[in-house]
Each structure stands twice: as C-alpha cells, then as structure tokens.
Image (cartoon, rainbow, N blue to C red):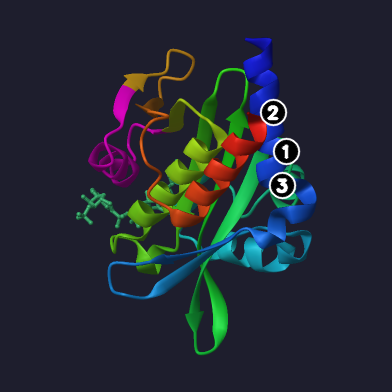
Amino acid sequence: MVDTMHQTLRRVDALLGPGDLSQHIDIVRLRDGRSMTLRFIEPDDAIVLQDYFRGLSVTSRYNRFLAAVGELPPSELEKTLHSGGNSFSILATLKCGGVDAIIGEARYAFDPVAARFEFGLSIDDHLQGQGIGTVLLSNLQCRAMALGASTIFGDTLRSNDAMQALARKAGYTFAALPSDWRLVRFEKSLDPAMELPCAGWRAHGREMTVAAN
Ligand SMILES: CC(C)(COP(=O)(O)OP(=O)(O)OC[C@H]1O[C@@H](n2cnc3c(N)ncnc32)[C@H](O)[C@@H]1OP(=O)(O)O)[C@@H](O)C(=O)NCCC(=O)NCCS
C-alpha cells in the first residue's frame, strides 16, 4: 500500500512537476472542427481569469462556485494561479481574430492515497451547449487516468441541469451528499486497463509507468 502510494506520488511529481507546467498543452478538436487549447493557468493570468469569471452570467458563476460571487475571492485566486502539489487549474482558449480568448476553465485535485480525482469546470455562457464541456470533461478524465486515479468525481447543485446532463451523458452515476442537501455528487470509476483517449496523456502515462517499474 505504502509502495503504491509512493509510486503514485512519484508519478504525480514526474507528470506535473511545478517547473514543467507550461509544457503541458493540449490541443483538442471541438464538434465544429475548431481547435481548443488547454493549458495550465499561470500567475500572469490573474487579470484575464478574473475578467472571464466576471463575464460569466450570475447563474453560471453561482453554479460554478456554489455561492453568489462576482469573481474569485483573493484566497481562491491565489490557489488557482499556482498549480502544484496535487491541485491544478487549466484554461481553455480559442483563437479569435488572432487572439487567444478564454472560453472555459477547470480546476482539479488529485488525492494520491485514495486515488480520487475531483474537478469543477465552466464554459463561457455564449458557448455553452456546443459540446465544449463534453470535450473538456473527456480531457479531465485523461488527466485523471494518467495520474492513476480510480475514481473521478465532482459536486454540483441539484438545480444544475446542464452539469448533471453532461455528467450523465459521460457515464457518471449520482449520489446525494448528506453533508449538504443542496448538492449532488456525480462520480465514475476509472479502469486502469482502459486505453486513454488523449494521445498526449497516454504517452505521459506510458512513460511514467515505465519509469516507476
Ligand atoms: C455545465 C457546463 C460546464 C456544461 O458545458 P457545455 O459546454 O454547455 O456542455 P455540452 O454542450 O458539452 O453539453 C453536454 C450535454 O449536456 C446536456 N445539456 C447541456 N446544457 C444543458 C442544459 N442547460 N439543460 C439540460 N441539458 C443540457 C446536453 O444533453 C448535452 O448533450 P448534447 O450536446 O448531445 O445535446 C456549462 O453549462 C457551464 O459552464 N455551466 C456553468 C458552470 C457550471 O455549472 N459548472 C459545473 C460546476 S461542477
């Protein structure tokens, strides 16, 4: 058990060492053929990130943060800007007129002892309902599997139909959260034998498996 834990921790360090984060960029194809870039958030992103959150509708912000906030509170902003340890934040961007526009974001945390991967995400209101959340969720699953997670999960408001529909379509099951009646947990088991659908993370996973043996 301890060996497994140490192996997993080595795997996290090797996969996502703080110095390497800017090197992990995914380019993923959207339903309409456009390419979305996924990259780790960096400290320089503070202003654009807060602009993105301020630009979300009141409902989307409430759904994302489970509270009425106008933007990320300072302590949350600090954490979001500094991925590392086992918590990571990513931005989804699209090229618009030569400029990278932020169209979504996600945060995730990996618990190497329990092999559980928790996430939250949002998509710009103007682009919701176009399959972008589905693509981002699939990418998060790749990251979870590359880290060795056996479970991926998130918590959302019972009233959040869009998130629940997205999770249901992706094969998640649902359970009540006794600690908070407003919330429902969506969760999915990950099979380590399953082939990772994202090429980049598949390669990382293979490299790390070889290194750990
Ligand atoms: C939840 C969210 C991420 C979904 O992203 P999205 O890009 O709109 O999702 P998709 O377009 O990939 O939709 C996936 C499926 O969910 C369903 N769906 C999407 N929006 C829906 C809505 N408002 N009501 C019901 N079902 C909906 C559809 O069945 C869709 O499948 P289809 O494309 O085959 O029709 C997005 O609505 C969002 O950012 N909401 C605000 C923040 C939030 O709620 N975050 C979740 C907190 S964990």
Q: Is residue 39 above or below residue 84?
A: below
Left or right: where does residue 196 sit relative to residue 131? right
Q: Which amino acid does label 3 sit on?
A: Ser
Q: Do the residues labelled 1 and 3 touch (CB within 8 Å)?
A: no
The numbered mark at residue 13 is 1
Q: Where is residue 144 in the image (x, y as percent from the top left)?
A: 50, 38
Q: Around disc 3, counting alpha carbons within 10 Å, would you say few (fewer than 14), some (14 to 19), or many (20 or more)?
A: many
Q: Name the residue under label 3.
A: 83
Earlier sequence position, callout 1 versus callout 3: 1
- Check whether the beta carbons of the residues at disc 1 and disc 2 lie within 8 A of each other: yes
Determine which quarter of the picture holds residue 207.
Answer: top right
Percent position (x, y) of residue 167? 31, 39
The mark nearer the N terminus, 2 or 3, is 2
Task: Identify which residue is drawn at 70% across, 21% down.
Answer: 6
In the image: residue 161, left or right of residue 46: left
The answer, for residue 153, to whether it is visible in the render is yes
Question: What residue sits right under mark 2 in the picture?
Answer: 9
Q: Identify the image quadrant of the C terminus.
A: top right
Q: Which residue is drawn at 51% across and 55% down?
A: 200
Under tag 1, what secondary structure? helix
- Badge 2 marks a residue whose secondary structure is helix
Which image quadrant is residue 194 in?
A: top left
Q: Would you say residue 59 sits in the magenta stretch?
A: no
The part of the chain drawn in magenta is: 156-174
Residue located at (64% from left, 27% from top):
8
Report the amino acid beneath label 1: Asp
Separation of residues labelled 1 and 3 (CA atoms): 12 Å
In the rendered picture of this protein, how many numbered marks are placed on residues?
Answer: 3
Three-letter code, disc 2:
Leu
Q: Where is residue 55 in the image (x, y as percent from the top left)?
A: 53, 66
